[in-house]
Image (spheres, rainbow, N blue to C red):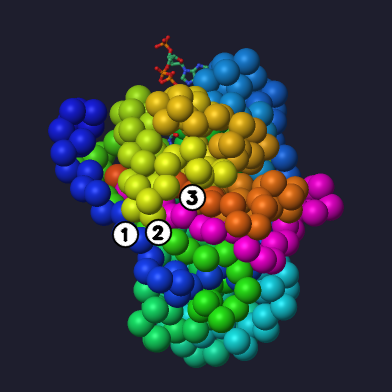
Amino acid sequence: MDLEEPMGSVWRASAVAAGPGGGCRVLGLGTALPSTRVSNADLERFLETSDEWIASRTGIQERRVAGPEETLLDLAARSARACLGAAGVEPGQVDTIICSSSSPDETFPSLACRLQAELGCPLGPAFDLQAACSGAVYGLALAQSLIQSGLSHRVLVVAAEIFSRLLDWSDRSTAILFGDGAGAFLVGDERSPGSEILALDLGADGRGATALGTLPAPLDSQPSPNMPEYTSSKRSLGRVVTMNGREVFRFSTKILEEVVLRLAESIGVGVGDIALVVPHQANSRILATAAGRLKFPMERFVTNLERTGNTSSASIPLALAEAAANGVCRTGDLICLVAFGAGLTWGGLILRWGPTAVRVDDPATGG
Ligand code: UT7
């Protein structure tokens, strides 16, 4: 299908202002990265590609990959502990856990249930959601509605991904794009100090489902001596990413622009009033194209994909945490998070930045 044409009419203006007082705040943010760095030059050793091609087409210079013994739960738990530690909240005060992952190592039990036991949280609801790269924003939206309904009071939203186990490492069109990492948000009600959620926009168009998905992993090929350990089929989740890059590119630039416009309109501000846009970290050309269409300065698009690659649903918390830790987010700023991904799905929200506590757990940089 041509995603460009009919989509405009079906991307309903679903952005909704979150109501007086917002009712809900992001209290804490924590992230975790694996320590192993893989540069474009490292990929050149076993893939027919070049640093020049990858950097100029995507903006990515390096990504992180999980170690042989490192699990999705390890990354999720590290990010959750960083988040709770920063916010000064005990695991016993978290009543709901929502996890997002497109790279779980088991179908069930959920990552969220594993995490609840690992952290020692009370026996409230714990479940995973699947919205691909939009998962963290979907999770925040769900957390907000659970809090507003009174069902939950402290919700941990954790997005964790190990895409290095979901790649065909012989496919240069996808292997260069992705990386591993995790990010956690703690969401509470308006009585707690944090960043207020002012507006939300969620959507999906399943007609684009074939643009980005997974296929069974190719049957075991003879491992080449040049292939590093992280590419080993022993580590594979048994499926690999498949993508129509151009179709995804077209969809992403268009939806990014539309969501930012709808969100700004829903709270009665202009796009220029937004201090920072924190987009899903897919590709710097997607971001530059959308920034150009919005006439929004690229310097106010937060990016860290140069160093992390595309970490799917973990990418927004990772980028936001890095910006906050570097002092880029200032009190009162309107900060727009925008995600887009397989499904096709999208999700955006506007935060009014406040005293959200942030901690970055990165053994490679000592963060
Ligand atoms: O979370 C969302 C995840 N997905 C995305 O963000 C993907 C969005 N799409 C993109 O970012 C771009 O489409 C890509 C970066 C994936 C590809 O860029 P492109 O400009 O659309 O390249 P292309 O697929 O049209 O390929 C151009 C050429 C082809 O060679 P020929 O046919 O012109 O000889 C490819 O075979 O580049 C070749 N190519 C590569 N060359 C060196 C494809 N991948 C590579 C590579 N290194 N890694």
For the C terminus, give its image quadrant: bottom right
Compared with 199, 109 (above or below) is below
Of callouts 1 and 2, which one flags the residue occurring earlier in the amino acid sequence?
Answer: 1
* 342 horizontally vs 26: left or right: left
Of tags 3 and 2, the one toward the viewer is 2
Q: Residue at x 69, y 46 (%)?
A: 328
Q: Which residue is mark 2?
A: 199
Mark 1 vs ligand 1: CB below 8 Å: no
Q: Which residue is mark 1?
A: 16
Whole-angstrom CA distance, mark 1 to mark 2, is 6 Å
Whole-angstrom CA distance, mark 3 to mark 1, is 14 Å
Q: Residue at x 55, y 90 (%)?
A: 122
Q: Check residue 349 for magenta coloring.
A: yes
Which amino acid type corresponds to the residue marked 3 in the rendered image? Leu
For the N terminus, give its image quadrant: top left
Mark 2 vs ligand 1: CB below 8 Å: no
Q: Which residue is mark 3?
A: 337
**Residue 38, position as x, y percentages in the image:** 69, 36
Of tags 3 and 1, the one toward the viewer is 1
Q: Is residue 186 visible?
A: yes
Q: Check residue 355 for magenta coloring.
A: yes
For label 1, the SS is: strand
Compared with 131, 283 (above or below) is above
Of callouts 3 and 2, which one flags the residue occurring earlier in the amino acid sequence?
Answer: 2
Which amino acid type corresponds to the residue marked 2 in the rendered image? Ala
**Stretch of the chain drawn in magenta:** 345-367
For label 2, the SS is: strand
Compared with 59, 332 (above or below) is below
The residue positioned farthest toward the right in the image shown: 366
